[in-house]
Every structure is written in C-alpha cells, then in structure tokens.
Image (tube, rainbow, N blue to C red):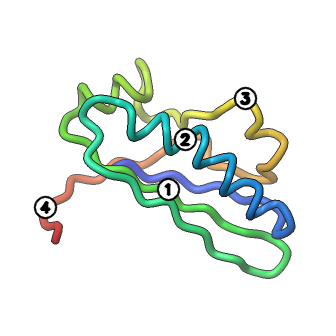
Amino acid sequence: MRVWRGWTRAEDAVAYEEYLLSTGYVGYTSTAGNRGVCFTRRDAGDRSEFLLTSLWESWEAIHAFAGQDPSRAVFYDEDDRFLVERELTVTHHEVFAFA
C-alpha cells in the first residue's frame, strides 16, 4: 500500500477533490497493476487533510506509476494552486490482510 497526505485551505477542499478525481485518481487507476485507491478528506478548522492510499500488485507497478524513486510523491500541474502543505515522500506498507 502506498500512502500520501496533503493539506488545502478548507474553502478549497471541494475544488481539490474534483481536481484529484480528474488527475490523481485517473493516474492511479489507469496504471497497470493498480489494485484500488481510497481518497479521503478530513476537515479540521481552516484546513482540510487529504489522505490517499493505493494498493499495488508489485513494486514494478509502483515504479510504473511513480517513476525511478517510488518514495517520492507524484504531483500534478495545478497542485501548487491548492496545497498549502504536502508530504514530498510517501510511505509504503506491506498488506498482510484485507477484506
């Protein structure tokens, strides 16, 4: 599982959701070897936190999505317009149970 977090201003959250669905969601799900994604949002005061998780069948599939260095986050052209804070790296976890 690949995990990334980023934050927007609360007033930009809905627009960022729409943007993510047209960029990141398409990028993740159209990559061979993607086994699913979960994009979540948590509003907290004047910010909204986005947590993106994705499941992959292999490291090769992750490389196909993320490039040479799979620990680096993947960003899209207009992310700077929305994100006030972001993780530049992602974490990877081995899934040992899933229902």
In this view, 17 is above or below 89: below
Q: Which residue is mark 4?
A: 96
Q: In the image, which is nearer the foreground, mark 2 or mark 4?
A: 2
Q: CA distance from mark 1 to mark 2?
A: 9 Å
Residue 35 appears at what percent x and percent y?
Answer: 25, 47
Q: Which residue is mark 1?
A: 52
Q: Name the residue at the left extreme.
A: 96
- Mark 4 Cα within 10 Å, few/some/many (few <14, many 20+)? few
In this view, 1 is above or below 80: below
Residue found 75% across the figure and 53% down from its top: 85
Residue found 74% across the figure and 40% down from its top: 79
The amino acid type of the residue labelled 3 equals Asp
Residue 62 appears at what percent x and percent y?
Answer: 32, 32
Q: Which residue is mark 3?
A: 77
Question: Which residue is at the front of the view, 66 or 24?
Answer: 24
Q: CA distance from mark 4 to mark 3?
A: 34 Å
Report the quarter where the C terminus lies: bottom left
Answer with left or right where residue 54 lies relative to residue 98.
right
- Mark 3 Cα within 10 Å, few/some/many (few <14, many 20+)? few
Decide: marks 1, 4 in contact (CB < 8 A)? no
Answer with left or right where residue 90 lies relative to residue 85.
left
Decide: marks 4, 3 in contact (CB < 8 A)? no
Residue 11 appears at what percent x and percent y?
Answer: 86, 67
- Mark 2 Cα within 10 Å, few/some/many (few <14, many 20+)? some
In this view, 14 is above or below 35: below
Q: CA distance from mark 3 to mark 1?
A: 18 Å
The amino acid type of the residue labelled 2 equals Gly
Question: Of callouts 4 and 3, which one flags the residue occurring earlier in the amino acid sequence?
Answer: 3
Q: Which residue is mark 2?
A: 24
In this view, 1 is above or below 23: below
The amino acid type of the residue labelled 1 equals Leu
